[in-house]
Image (cartoon, grey):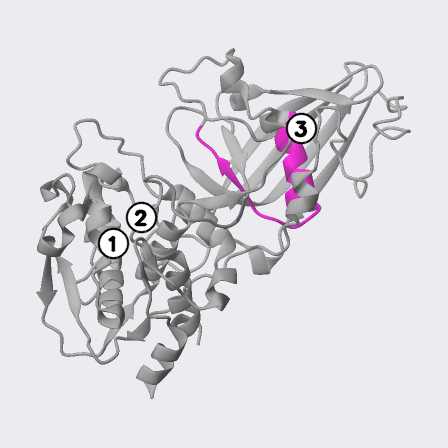
Amino acid sequence: MQMLKIQSLLLVVLLAAGLSQPAAAQRFGDDERFDDEFYGELATRSDDRIYSSSTAAPSSRDSRGGSGPSAPSQSFEQTASVPQTYKPWSGTWWPRPVAELAFKKFNEGLSPLEKYDSIVLSLYGKLAGAAAWEADPVHRHNYAPAETKLDWSGHCNGLAAASILAPEPTKSFQVPLGRNPRKVRLKLKNPKSAKAYLYSDRDSDYEAVKNDRKNITLTVADMKGLLSETYMTCKTQKFENRDITGRRYNREEIDPNDEAFRDIHPHYFHWILQEFVKKNGMVIVAEIDPHFPVNNHPLFKYETKVTHDSRNRRYRVSTKCYFSDYASTHQFVGTNVMTRTYTYDLHQDSSGRVTRGSWTGRSAYNHPDFVWIPTSDAPHYKTYENAAVNGDFVRWLFMEYGRN
């Protein structure tokens, strides 16, 4: 009966990069709270209002209207958080120098991608080669054999997007393998033994695993790893003004006076917190390392303290941001919270409009590099995402067997 259920739900059609899946799986992961037409057309400018209408402004007139506050300085506070339902979960960042998704084994002697290969082979009769693709140095998901190593590189962006767009895996579950259960693993023992173009001749680089069971267990770690890989490429919120989200600082040495280092600019950062976290209850992702490395973390809550200095026409701001940090273990369930406090000034022109911002204190050297807002999954692109893994199939497995 179980086999008939699988055959009725899965279309036995093989594509070069994966498998075709039930239509329901294609909708999984989209954040329906995003209105692409509205936000896609939103023309945000540097003089847009910084504080939302629900916040009591310290001035006697609207910030667009002109006159400043009647007192020399006034202070106020603001706290905003996304609903608990949308709070991002934590996971590991699956570092590339050790290619954990291909080699790290949690149970049954198989890595997350070896389990994926075994499931696909059992149900479809074809080897997907996901573990081989990941281990192949050509695809830049395994830096172990490389002469130049980026020891900080991993799947942090995929993890961040998955933790926002996908429900959290909280327990192990079993996937039935049908009438022809087969389990396979790479013949390679570690990432350093992988050769270039491993994926192209993958059939010869796998070996069968003795199998006396007709199912395979996906642990919390396995499922979080597969989801993190799936969301390595995803759709993101777009703005007409590209400068709003900031740009990566792609230099080894920093210069705090460099315009490229100072972004994301504080007035844009503050506006995004207001518009998305406070007004719409949406999680954003901040790349928190202002230097050359990339370190993505979902931001789901903030607490702001503001003092308005009317004489110098500026807001002096201190904002405590709450992020989901990396998990302490691969099987971790829940949100490991990390906080960082940023200070900045928001400068006004003579009419009271905020026109620019500047990082202050320690934040001049340590502030977010850029932010981005994932909205839904997208097809794999170049080598950012494992081309042998089908995201719809991964999500279908989780919905069908992992959420019962």
Q: Disc 1 residue type?
A: Ala
Position of residue 143 in the picture relative to residue 323 (left or right):
left
Q: Disc 2 residue type?
A: Asn
Instruction: Identify which residue, 276 or 358, lies in the foreground.
Output: 276
Position of residue 371 in the picture relative to residue 105 (left or right):
right
Instruction: Identify which residue, 160 or 383, lies in the foreground.
Output: 383
Task: Give the x, y percent position of residue 215.
Answer: 25, 76
Q: In the picture, which quadrant includes the C terminus?
A: bottom left
**Residue 47 vertical placement versus 386 (above, below):** above
Residue that badge 2 annotates: 386
Residue that badge 1 annotates: 130
Magenta highlight range? 267-289
Secondary element at tag 3: strand
Could you tell me if the residues under marks 1 and 2 are in contact, i.e. CB atoms within 8 Å? yes
Bin the neighbour count of mark 2 within 10 Å (Cα to Cα): few under 14, some 14-19, many 20 and up: many
Question: Which numbered disc covers residue 317?
Answer: 3
Task: Give the x, y percent position of residue 87.
Answer: 54, 55
